[in-house]
Image: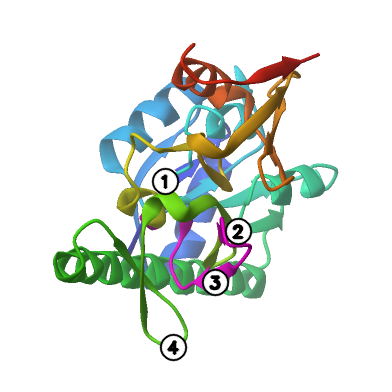
Amino acid sequence: MINAVIIEDKAINAKTLQAMVRNYCPSVNIVGIAGDIDSAFAMLRQHMPDLAFLDIEMLGGSGFDLLRKFDPVPFEVIFTTAYNQYAIEAFQENVLDYLLKPINISNLQRAVAKVEKQVALKKSNEEVAKHLRSLQKLAPGKISLPTIDGYLFIAPQEIIRCEASGSYSNFYMSSGKKIVVSMLLKKCEDLLPSALFLRIHNSHIINLQFVQQYIRGRGGYIVMQDGSRVDVAASRKQDFLDAMSPAHSIRISK
């Protein structure tokens, strides 16, 4: 069963969607409805649902404003809106689907099917992460990563950075090798020592020891020692600057 909330400022639209979900999406359990950004934020933190049906244009702010209160967003999102001009921005925010009002039943069912797959994948990743923690006892000082061929044991200090790639994560090593790992980036983050690694973006984790240069901007970007360029989310910029203590030799450019 998928727990979901509806965030919609028009009561009639919220009731209509709730009825559609109840009648045509039996795997979804609506646990709450909110009509504005503040109450929606409180509801999401209280219920921690798997899914949010989210309107875009609402009183007191937009659906995008609400999502920016979370970093990363811990639930799947299906936008429900009467406007199609937000589609590109929505998918840039990793929204799972975008339904135009009036909502078509088959489109709703298709979107929910996507959520079901994503939720199942998250649960699978949690089980993998649990197994990896037990495996790490076999190789002290190393972390174990699930790959296509099995498990790979590596020293964290050899990792330059990690990048999200859909349901997988790419590890870029100091040797120049790229390792594809069958885990979401959040689970990889849990395995990495926080003294060395920092998540600077929804899609990026870096090894602070390999930072070569920081270029200012709204969030700015980092140049790593292997020459790769990694964007910094505006909401994570201060965390990065705080982590780079004066002991680090780093050149900051305008």
Mark 2, Cα crowd under 10 Å, few <14 / some 14-19 / many 20+, is: some
The label shown at residue 180 is: 3
Image point (32%, 43%), residue name: 193
Q: Which residue is mark 4?
A: 149
- Answer whether labels 4 and 2 touch (C-beta < 8 Å): no
Which color mode does the image show? rainbow
Q: Which residue is mark 1?
A: 74
Q: Which is nearer the N-term, disc 2 or disc 3?
A: 2
Q: Which residues are magenta?
A: 172-187
- Answer whether labels 4 and 1 touch (C-beta < 8 Å): no
Q: Position of residue 181 (x, y in %)?
A: 48, 70
Q: Quadrant of the N terminus?
A: bottom left
The relative height of residue 110 versus residue 9 in the rendered view (above or below) is below
**Closest to the observer, 57 or 174:** 174
| Kind of residue indicated by mark 4 | Asp
**Element on which disc 1 rests:** loop
